[in-house]
Amino acid sequence: MLVGSPEDLTRVAAAMNSSPWQCITVNLPREALRTAREDRSIDLVILVPGPSLAAYTELCRSIKFDKRSAFMSVIVLLSHEHAQRACDVFEAGADDCIRAGASEREILLRLLKAMRVKRATDSLEDSAAVILALANAIEGKDHYTCGHVERVGMYAVAIGRQVGVDEEGLAALKIGGVVHDIGKIGIPDHILNKPGKLNDDELEIMRRHPVIGYNILQPLRTFRPVLPIVRWHHERPNGSGYPDRLSAADIPLPARITAVADCFDALSTDRPYRSAFPIPKCQQILAESAEKGELDKELVRVLYDILNAGGLMATAA
């Protein structure tokens, strides 16, 4: 998508005409923003500011800092008049900046580079989508946990927000909740769905799922922030957990948060061997577990406060 007045787009349009791309030309920044938000097929936005640069830097910022359009590449072509304003453009989130005087060939090469980066980003997004779909498919094997992973992510985010986890950390908690049990894809169905207590051999097999999940996700850079959650959400502060027998502060905060969220959801939903416990009973069991060192005591208290404030009652009743 080309954004700028018709007279300012001449050289860029010439470069674009030598390529096989489909090109949309938009004259007004506000119209361009609406188009960017509505048309997810747009790969590249080229801004050619007129006399006023401010409207275009604001457009760039609106595109790049909005989740609906953040992965679109934005390139700004600066005139001689704005040649010293490149830092303002990059601060607004632009992926590249082409200064006045660039040849049509340079413009085309810079656009091709931006497109390669966009394609690589799309590939990462596609890989992430496949993994998330796989994580949700696990619930098809483990039928009693319908909705479990989404709820764990939601509870973990609620706890994380209360203890001051930043936005990136909250995003990791949400995704971590969805993929924390992805390793169950390697667990036989007869063990996942056994309507009773697992024997020692079955329990040993079940306890492999954090490592299986970790090994699935470890090669994927997109999922690196959630690896501690996947591997260590069954570790316990008193050292009684698995798979690595970590204890206390050796267990990363995201994994400790997810452990509390996971246990709460297990208690508050139906299982093959029992019905869901009422919320007060869940709180009692969690408090007892915290006293034994099986859960982080402070995080259990935070969840208790959230529940008493009604923050999760609608979904955990």
Image: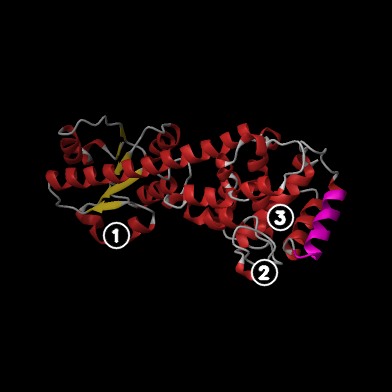
Q: Is residue 139 visible?
A: no
**Number of the label disc, if any, that sits on residue 141:** none
In percent of width and height, residue 175 lies at 56, 47
- Mark 1 and mark 2: span between their CA atoms? 51 Å
Q: How is the image coloured?
A: secondary structure
Q: Secondary structure at mark 3?
A: helix
The secondary structure that dominates the magenta segment is helix
Q: Earlier in the sequence, mark 1 or mark 2?
A: 1
Give the residue pinned by disc 1.
85
Q: Quadrant of residue 34?
A: top left
Q: Is residue 283 magenta?
A: yes
Q: Is residue 271 magenta?
A: no
The quadrant the N terminus occupies is top left
Give the residue pinned by disc 3.
260
Magenta residue span = 281-293
Q: Give the amino acid type for the residue marked by disc 2 in the picture.
A: Ala
Q: Give the amino acid type for the residue marked by disc 3 in the picture.
A: Val
**Number of the label disc, if any, that sits on residue 248:** 2
- Mark 2 and mark 3: span between their CA atoms? 14 Å
Q: Give the amino acid type for the residue marked by disc 1 in the picture.
A: Arg
Q: Secondary structure at mark 1?
A: helix
- Mark 3 and mark 1: span between their CA atoms? 49 Å
Q: Is residue 247 visible?
A: yes
Name the residue located 23 percent from the left edge and 44 percent from the top edge: 111
